[in-house]
Every structure is written in C-alpha cells, then in structure tokens.
Image (tube, coloured by chain):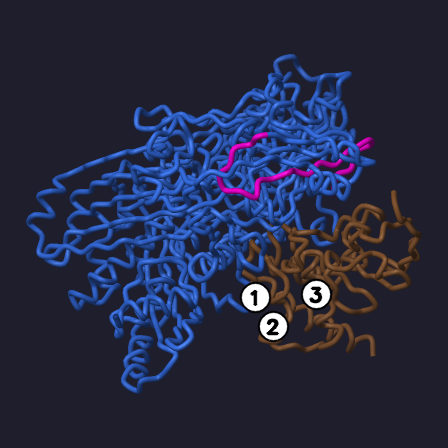
Chain colours: A blue, B brown
C-alpha cells in the first residue's frame, strides 16, 4: 500500500474540502441563518467628497418591516474609531470613524445602516433615507493630490501625504555618475484588486443575556479581527467569537478589518438581535480594498552590461483612508523594497510616498508591491537589452543573484537561496525560446499580423511573512502565529491553526504535514481553522505565509506530542522511548516492526489506561509519570524565506485593434519542499489567470472628479476561460535552509511575475514600432494609445 | 408582506410551494425560502454565473429571474447532482483535476458543465471554453475546470457505453 505510506508531504493528495464544496454544502456567510435574524443594508455616498448637512430617517423608519436606521451619530458612543498607525516617524497616524458623521471621502462610503426584516425591505428603506449633501471638490489622481491647491482628504494628513520614506544604500551617486548608460522610465500602474467572487458579508449575533458576540464574516484574519473588533466595541476578546468557515476568495482584499465588521456587530448590540449584511457587487467594488495603483519612476545605471544601481521613486495611491490595521503602506513599502527583485545592483536608493485621494482605501492584493515593481523593472530591463542589443535572457542571467547562497539586498531582505538561474534557463528550454525568436524574425520579415511577442522574467517571492520579514520591509511589528496538535482518545488527530483557508486547501495539505510528523495517515487528521473559539491564535492567511508558518508550527507541536506518544509506547512495549518508531498508524520497538501496536491503542492508553478497543494488553493502570497531555500548541516565527522561479509568455498583439492574446505561458517554480504538487500547480494556474486580468483589462476607474466608473462586473472585467492560455508548469526543488521542513511559500507567484512578463511580451511584439509601455492595463485602448504615441 | 402569492416549483424533482413576493429573485427563493444554499450569488448583475441553475433544462442565471417566473417549472440546482458518498461524474472530475479552490463559483460551473455535456457529449476544448465563458472563477485560472469537463465527458461516455 505505497499510496498510504509515509511520507505524505509531497504527494498529490485529493482535497478534503471538495466533497462539501461540490455538493452545495459549503458554509459561506450568507448560508448561515439565525432565529430572529434581521437584515442590514447600507446607505452609501454617491459623491466622492461631500459634507453631510443632515440625515432624515423618518420616512425609512415609517416603512413597514424597518426596525432601525443607524447613523454615525448613533455609533459614535459605542464604537471606537479605527486607528491606522505604523511606528515610524515618516508615517502619519490616521483615524477613521467606522461610520462617518460629518463628511464622506469617496463614492460608496457608508453613512447609514437600515435594518429590516428582509434584505429587500432594508434596501427599500435605504431609498427612503434622505441625506442632505454639500458636495466639495474632490481629487482622484495621486499626482494631482500632491499639488499645493489640491482638496485635502484628511486634516491629519496635510498635503494628502500619509508617508514619505527614503532609503539609500551604497554609492548611488557614484554609480550613476560613472555609468556607461542611464535608462529611466515612468510607469502608471492601474488601480485593481483581488475581486473575490463572494461579496463581503457580516452576520453578527450579540446575545445580551451572556454579553457574547458571535460573528461570521469574510475575513482572512479571524483572530486579528476578533481582537480589533472587541477593542472597537470595548469588549473582552474572549467574549467575541469570529467565524470564517468557507470564503469565496480573498487574495489579500480580506487581510484587513473592514468598517462593516465593526458596524454590524455594533448594530446587533444596539438591537439585541442577530443582524446580517451581505454586500451587493456594486458596494463591494466601490468600498472594497483596492490595490496596486502606483506611479513609479525607475532609473538604472548600466556599466559594462551590468545594472550597477537603481533609483526608484514610488507614489502610491492610498485612497481616502489608511487601511486598518496595516495602513496604506502595504504597496507603498513593498514596491520599493522589492525593486531589486532577482538583481544585485551595487547601490540603490528609493523614495516612496503614500498619497490620499477621494477613492476607496487600498491595501493588499496578491503579490503586494512585488508585482508592480516587477512590471516597471522588467520593462526597463528589456529596454536596456534592446538598446544594448543583448538578448533579454542573457542580460538577466548576467545580472542575477545565482541563488547559490544567501543574498542581502540593499532594501533589507535576506534571500535564502534557490534555483535562480536554473529556473530561468529551464523556462528558456520549455518555451523553445530560440525557436520562438526564429519564428518572430520570420513573421516580422513577412509583415505578418498579429505581431508575436515574447516576455520572460525571473522572480523571487517573499513568503512566510513573520516579524523578521515585516521588519526587513520596514514594518516595525511582530506577529504571533500558532498551531495546536491533539491526539484524540481514538487516535485520530485534531489540528487547529490561526490560519484561514479560502481556497488554499489547508485541510488537505496541513493534514499531510501533521500526518508525517506523527506517523499516521492524513485521513486520520482533521484540520480546523477559521473559528476563533476552536482554533489557536494566528495572524491569518495572507502573503504566502501559511505553508511556512503554520506548517512549521504544526511540525513543532506534533513533535511534542510524538515525544509523549513515545513515552507511553515505551511503557507499553517495555522499551526506551528513544527506541520507539511510529509510522503509518503503527508503533513498534526499533527492529521489531512485526510486533507493532496501533497508534490508536497508545492514544487510548494515554486517556483511559487502556486502549479504547480494550485489547492493548497493558495489564494495569497508567503510572503517574505518564499523565501526559497528548496536545501541544506551538508558535513559529520563521526567518526570511523566499521562493523563486521564472516565467515565459508568448503573446500576440493585433496592431489594428489593440487586442492582446496570451497564447502560451511556461512557468518554472521552486518553493522548496512541496506539500502537495497538485495544490502548487493550482496556485500557479490561478495566479497566472489573475495576472492576465491585471495586465490586460482589470481596472477600477475613477473620473478626474472622483466619480466611480466601475460599479459592475461589466465595467470591471475579469478573465474568463477564453482568456486563459495553455500553461506549461515545471518544478525545481531547493528546500529552504532556514525554515522548518525546507518549506517556502508560493501562493502569489503568477501575480508576482505574470503581469510583468505579459507587459514585456506586448512591448516585445511592438518594439519594431518603437512602442514603449508606460501605462497599465494593456487593454485595446491602452495598446492603441501606446502605438499612437510611438508614431507621433 | 405585500403582494405575496404562492408559487409551486419542482426543485430537483420535488414540488415545492412557498408564498413569494413578485420581486423575489429565483436565487433568493432557492437559497432562503427553500434552504438550498448551494446556489451562490456573486454579482446580482448577471455576469459572474455563480447562481447558474437549470430551469426546464435551460441554463439560467437565477439572479436575473424572478421566482414567480419559474412558477410551474422544473428547476435543477447543484443539490440535484451527487452526494458526498456518491459524487456525480462531473463532480468527481472536478475533484480529480483540482478544478475548485474556494468553491464559491463551483456550483454554477457544475450546472453549466452538466448542461453542456447533456447537449454535447463530446465537446472540444474550444467548445468547453466557449460554453463556460459566462462563469467566472477567480481562483483556478480555469485550467483544472477545462480539464475536468473533458474528463467528465469521457467518463460519462464510458458509462453510457456500459449502460448500452
């Protein structure tokens, strides 16, 4: 039975999650119904910037079925505002009332909540709430927001500036002064976001008799939300329970605590009834966590074909509020920190600014900072290659870190090594790079349309975000993440973690980790997450941290429990605990596997002095010194860890219509020890799919006046099955020397390197026309505009 | 509630009667009146396809149909397919090919795939992609989904051969 035998890590194990999700048995927020439950809907601002002169709730309250209309004034006494702060002198601390009382700062900002007996009636009630608005000038463009006369979004952020951070390392001036060439470009990266398919939702049930609050919500951080909401409501955390069982995607957009996650429980507490709010798509689009809108200036000094220095200036559009709790610095700090990427310049300088505008707040989306940095840097590297007439792959190889050992970047990261050059070479071979270039030459000579373009790139992805990685970024904070492992009386295993799975297959893969650590089959392991009442504390799932952090915590906790199992088994088998072996659900004295006893029998002995099945033959009670708990909770905070890989994109561009088609993608990734290759491939495919949207059409558009132009999925276009190319995936395995089990995180790969490689392919296709890409996305209008500008 | 009238819909083979407001969406009727929460609502704008069900054998977005419009009709939802113990071949194929991650879009894809394979037992990859373009998956990049539908077609064809 090789398939049942250890090790289970590294195997293609089918998912534990699937049977319920395939049969309609998922447990998403809107699937939960409670007795006496009321429904909430929000009155939201149609204006980008306006003062609130008054809110008339009378007509709404008169509507049959409406129970309450709650405004910011009603909540001011019962909910503390959100304070978004980072302990750095360059960063301003900003405060947000969860429900504004005096002023709205973006289209879609909530101003009142109508609570009724059905969602239909709650929405009717919203139509009857009359807000007396006094619109004021708004600013939507971050560059305009930095001008002296710009409307001010927050009085605590003069000049609309949340942060202004500089870093310089090495002799930047010298490198640029002595360079053979200096290349520079400015890139406008568009506002887009994770766009999870399940809309935001909160169901809050405050029970007055027990002073307990239970809430179901769409969050990647149940424990952090528990702590933050409890704090905002003035309740002990232990009286607050946050549940996020199944969730329809997150992609970073739910690594935050939303204002609705404070408002809805507060309303439930005011009314003493359960209250459910399920957002519609328009409010999810208008008031969600947007991301990645940046204007990046990058220049590089090149001497003897080497990139000797980089200088970056990043202006990151925060939106109207600083995200809670991570602040608006998520992209603003990560983008310049990730600017070196795989390269090893001698010197680097950056300045990064986070700027308020009258748009929804911004925060994480898969590949924070890294993805946009990769776009501008890789486009510029290709421009260098074109100018110097060097092949883009050879130029990269000449300038890359090898991955042979640790490498410290000027921005504070310590890469733990990997297959940096090998991965790029592997992609080169897989995509038949030489053959593609021949084909491209032939087509260009024949004047064939559409044009063929090739984009390549190598990447590192930061993962396992712990205090160490956060501090390396410039986020002065620690994090606590833990896992518990318990062997139950029947020998089955319960694992809980502070993570939250929303597609990442934790119930499957983390069970594989625990199974190997204990010597049982993965089917014997149940993984429970996403419920603060049943799971141990952790910062949740984001930034490719779960496999590294929670996998490592499980290994440590399981090691404790295994040691106690060995103690018990040593007594039962009359041998030293050091001589006990455990595998495949059996326990034996080293050298005597035929005389094995069942893992379950040892568990039963621990609890009852005899096996549950009653046949272990221990012949007596359990000595007092064997009163051990078969459970352990262990934290794990890993050192910095980076996975790596490379991508090759083949795309065609129709110069007449501006339509880009991604024809093929070759991908080689190295995340060290793979927990489950099927799941790794799934993360690659999914993130490449999102990269196509990010590169080619996803955009949260605002008018210059702050009007929101993307309120439906007919405006905010997501990739469909027709947009996804053939995908060829290869793996290299360089276990991390610094983490438990050699695990590296890889959940964001395609969004780290994909948009860049697609942009590079488009630029490559259009290079004969002299086109330079300096604005994303590359939708038909964008491509045609780039062609026009090259001709003018 | 104003203007409620009873409607009868045959859902997954069983006649179900419930008083219904004329403006109630079929999706809400299925989810909240009948408790069939497998059908998901992702946009209420007719774009994402998560709420896809079959009405008299036709693919329908249940967020764009009023429940009263389904009065007297036969509706099939994801709950009509297999069970945890005995998955439908399309469900099996989705599991085997890692065609779902968060699982929110999955019921809609399963019903869309069923409609395709009912009408065209041996679709090409291009036909599968074209047919599924009305359903959005945010997690998988569609790679596993397309592979699963192809595999399900083969499996169903084999079962059909055996049944003959």
Could you say which is closer to the camera, residue A233 or residue A635?
Answer: A233
Residue A218: name its quadrant: top right
The circle on residue A721 is: 1
Could you say which is closer to the camera, residue B46 or residue A140?
Answer: A140
Contact (Cβ within 8 Å) of mark 2 with mark 1? yes
Q: Residue furthest top?
A: A624
The circle on residue B112 is: 3
Asked whether residue A592 is in view, the answer is no
At label 3, counting other C-alpha atoms closer than 10 Å, the crowd grade (few under 14, some 14-19, many 20 or more) is many
Could you say which is closer to the camera, residue A373 or residue A614?
Answer: A373
Residue visible at 43% across and 30% down in the picture: A637
Q: Which residues are magenta?
A: A31-53
A613 horizontally vs A506: left or right: right
User: What secondary structure is found at the residue carrying circle 3?
Assistant: helix
- Which numbered disc flags the more N-terminal residue, 2 or 3? 3
Label 1 – label 3 distance at C-alpha: 13 Å
The circle on residue A700 is: none
């Amino acid at each position: 039975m090789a398939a049942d035998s250890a090790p289970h890590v590294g195997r293609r194990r089918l998912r534990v999650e699937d049977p319920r999700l395939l049969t309609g048995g998922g447990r998403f927020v809107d699937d939960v119904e409670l007795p006496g439950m009321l429904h909430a809907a929000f009155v939201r601002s149609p204006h980008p910037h306006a003062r609130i002169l008054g809110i008339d709730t009378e007509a709404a309250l008169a509507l049959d079925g409406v129970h309450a209309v709650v405004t910011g004034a009603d909540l001011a006494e019962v909910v503390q505002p959100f304070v978004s702060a980072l302990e750095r002198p360059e960063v301003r601390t900003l405060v947000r009332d969860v429900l504004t009382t005096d002023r709205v700062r973006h289209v879609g900002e909530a101003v009142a909540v109508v609570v009724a007996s059905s969602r239909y009636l709650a929405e009717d009630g919203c139509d009857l709430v009359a807000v007396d608005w006094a619109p004021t000038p708004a600013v939507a463009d971050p560059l305009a927001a930095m001008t002296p006369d710009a409307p001010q979004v927050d009085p605590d952020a003069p000049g609309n500036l949340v942060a202004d951070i500089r870093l310089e390392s090495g002799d930047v001036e010298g490198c640029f002064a002595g360079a053979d060439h200096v290349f520079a470009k400015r890139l406008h990266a568009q506002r887009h976001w994770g766009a999870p398919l399940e809309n935001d939702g909160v169901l809050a049930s405050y029970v007055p008799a027990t002073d307990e609050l239970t809430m179901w919500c769409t969050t990647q951080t149940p424990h952090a939300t528990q702590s933050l909401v409890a704090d905002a409501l003035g309740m002990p955390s232990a009286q607050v329970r946050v549940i996020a069982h199944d969730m329809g995607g997150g992609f970073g957009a739910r690594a935050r605590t939303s204002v609705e996650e404070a408002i809805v429980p507060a309303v439930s507490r005011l009314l003493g009834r359960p209250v459910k709010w399920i957002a519609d798509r328009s409010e999810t689009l208008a008031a969600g966590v947007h991301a990645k809108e940046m204007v990046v200036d990058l220049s590089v000094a090149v001497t003897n074909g080497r990139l000797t220095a980089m200088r970056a200036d990043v202006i990151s559009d925060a939106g109207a509020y600083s995200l809670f709790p991570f602040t608006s610095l998520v992209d603003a700090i990560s983008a310049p920190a990730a600017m070196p990427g795989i390269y090893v310049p001698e010197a680097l300088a950056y300045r990064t600014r986070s700027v308020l505008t009258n748009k929804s707040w911004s925060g994480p989306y898969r590949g924070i900072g890294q993805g946009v940095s990769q776009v501008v840097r890789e486009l510029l590297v290709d421009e260098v290659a074109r100018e110097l007439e060097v092949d883009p792959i050879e130029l990269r190889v000449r300038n890359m870190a090898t991955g042979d050992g640790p490498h410290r970047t000027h921005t504070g990261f310590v890469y733990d090594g990997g297959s940096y050059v090998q991965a790029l070479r592997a992609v080169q071979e897989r995509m038949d790079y030489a053959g593609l270039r021949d084909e491209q030459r032939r087509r260009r000579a024949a004047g064939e349309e559409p044009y063929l373009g090739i984009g390549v790139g190598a990447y590192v992805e930061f993962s396992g975000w712990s205090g160490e990685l956060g501090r390396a970024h410039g986020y002065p904070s620690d994090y606590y993440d833990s896992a518990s492992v318990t062997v139950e009386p029947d020998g089955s295993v319960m694992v809980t973690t502070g993570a939250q799975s929303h597609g990442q297959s934790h119930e499957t893969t983390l069970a594989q980790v625990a199974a190997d650590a204990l010597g049982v089959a993965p089917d014997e392991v149940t993984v429970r997450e996403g419920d603060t009442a049943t799971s141990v504390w952790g910062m949740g799932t984001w930034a490719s941290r779960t496999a590294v952090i929670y996998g490592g915590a499980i290994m440590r906790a399981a090691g404790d429990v295994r040691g106690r199992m060995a103690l018990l088994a040593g007594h039962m088998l009359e041998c030293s605990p050091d001589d006990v072996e455990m595998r495949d659900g059996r326990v034996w004295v080293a050298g005597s596997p035929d005389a094995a006893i069942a893992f379950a029998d040892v568990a039963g002995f621990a609890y009852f002095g005899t096996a549950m099945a009653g046949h272990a033959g221990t012949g007596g009670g359990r000595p007092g010194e064997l009163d051990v708990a078969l459970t352990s909770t262990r934290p794990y905070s890993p050192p910095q860890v980076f996975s790596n890989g490379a991508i090759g994109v083949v795309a065609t561009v129709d110069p007449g219509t501006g339509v880009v088609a991604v024809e093929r993608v070759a991908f080689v990734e190295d995340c060290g020890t793979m927990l489950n290759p099927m799941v790794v491939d799934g993360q690659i495919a999914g993130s490449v799919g999102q990269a196509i949207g990010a590169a080619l059409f996803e955009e949260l558009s605002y008018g210059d006046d702050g009007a929101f132009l993307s309120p439906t999925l007919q405006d905010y276009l997501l990739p469909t099955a027709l947009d996804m190319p053939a995908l060829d995936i290869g793996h290299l395995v360089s276990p991390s020397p610094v983490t438990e089990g050699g695990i590296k995180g890889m959940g964001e790969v395609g969004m780290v390197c994909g948009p860049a490689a697609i942009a590079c392919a488009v630029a490559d296709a259009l290079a004969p026309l002299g086109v330079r890409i300096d604005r994303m996305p590359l939708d038909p209008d964008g491509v045609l505009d780039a062609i026009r500008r090259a001709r003018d | 509630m104003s203007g409620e009238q009873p409607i009868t819909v045959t859902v997954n083979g069983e006649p179900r009667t419930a008083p219904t407001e004329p403006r109630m969406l079929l999706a809400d009727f299925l989810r909240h009146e009948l408790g069939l929460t497998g059908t998901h609502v992702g946009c209420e704008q007719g774009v994402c396809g998560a709420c896809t069900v079959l009405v008299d054998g036709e693919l329908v977005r249940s967020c764009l149909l009023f429940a009263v419009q389904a009065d007297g009709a036969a509706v099939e939802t994801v709950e009509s397919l297999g069970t945890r113990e005995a998955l439908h071949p399309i469900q099996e194929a989705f599991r085997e090919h890692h065609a779902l991650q968060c699982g929110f879009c999955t019921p809609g894809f399963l019903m869309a795939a069923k409609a395709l394979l009912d009408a065209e037992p041996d679709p090409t990859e291009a036909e599968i992609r074209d047919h599924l373009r009305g359903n959005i998956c945010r997690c998988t990049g569609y790679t596993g989904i397309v592979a699963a539908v192809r595999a399900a077609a083969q499996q169903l064809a084999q079962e059909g051969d055996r049944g003959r």
